[in-house]
Amino acid sequence: LQTWARTWPRRRAYRRYQRAVIALQCALRLWRAKATLRALRLKARDVGALKDKNENLKREIDELRQNAAKKAAEQTAAVKTEAERLRGTVEDLTLQLRSEQDARHAAEVARDKAANDLEAARKLVETTKEAAAASVAESKRLATEAAQKAAGHQKALSAAEDRFRAELAKAVKQAKGASSAPPPASGKPPVAPLSGIAAMFPRKKQPAPKPLDLDQSTQPGNVVPGGGDTRGRRKSASRSPREAEAATALRELTAENRRLREALALAQTTAGLNSSTPASGGSGLSERAPEEAPETSLPSNASPQRRRRSMSVARRRSMSPPPSSQAAAASGTASPSGPSP
């Protein structure tokens, strides 16, 4: 008991001290808990704000994503449109390049063809020049030969004309004497011996004597190249056989002379055309052709009479020599006794 009494104040003080410490520790723990709770409440408030902020950020992110998707779709559509436009431009440029290549190739082909045509034209011009030179030489040769033949035939024609005039005058005198003399008893006219041109032809059966036309229609100057006198062919029936034979021979010589004159005129015309042809070849003939074409060209509905008339006119024009050759022939064939028939 004494020991317990001695130790009790100390134990009581210890218990008090222990209770005070526990109370102090509880107060500290309570203060700490209150401070922690206060901090947690503040943190809870901050968490709500953060949640709201997170929600706002999520909404903004969604809007940004939607805007980005729209922009991406728009950019994709624009890129597709631009790609289509660029593809069309590339196709157009490709077609243009192909067309330019085709045009260049066609131009090269045309240039080669033009060069070949030009070379062929040059060769043709050279050949035409050679042919024209040969034609001119041949025309000159033919003209010279025709002139020589025409001169010989003209001499023969002049001699035949002189003989015919002499025989004609003799025949006229004999006819005048026969008309003034009495007819023979047999009733047949006297037969005179043939001489000159008439001796070259066989004697035919003589018709009954008819009155002789003593006018000037049978003179050499009035005999036309086609035969007969200037008043028609009916006067030839009143001629004697010798006169008919002489007229026939004269007509043959005249026709031969006319053919020679036509050949000479044609040769001279050809020589003149060939000499007037320019160096390019053949343009002189082409220039003359349009001038002569209207003479024979007729419409398709022309009448047959008009066609025959135009053909006869063209034939006479083609057969008649030019005035210069006619004047030369007239000056070369004029005889002292008078004009040639």
Image (tube, rainbow, N blue to C red):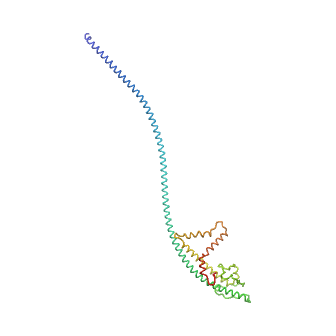
- The image shows residue 44 at horizontal and vertical percentages of 40, 26
Vertical side of 260 occupied by 295: above or below = above
Which of the 4 image quarters holds residue 27?
Answer: top left
* Callout count: 0
Determine whether, in the image, residue 66 is placed left or right of residue 252: left
Vertical side of 164 occupied by 271: above or below = above
Vertical side of 62 occupied by 105: above or below = below
Residue at the farthest top position: 1
Which part of the image, by quadrant, shows the C terminus? bottom right
Which part of the image, by quadrant, shows the N terminus? top left
Determine whether, in the image, residue 152 is placed left or right of residue 232: left
Determine whether, in the image, residue 258 is placed left or right of residue 66: right
- The image shows residue 308 at horizontal and vertical percentages of 66, 71
Decide which of 150, 8 is in the foreground and name it.
150
Decide which of 185, 66 is in the foreground and name it.
66
Vertical side of 231 occupied by 282: above or below = above
- The image shows residue 266 at horizontal and vertical percentages of 58, 75
- The image shows residue 214 at horizontal and vertical percentages of 70, 84
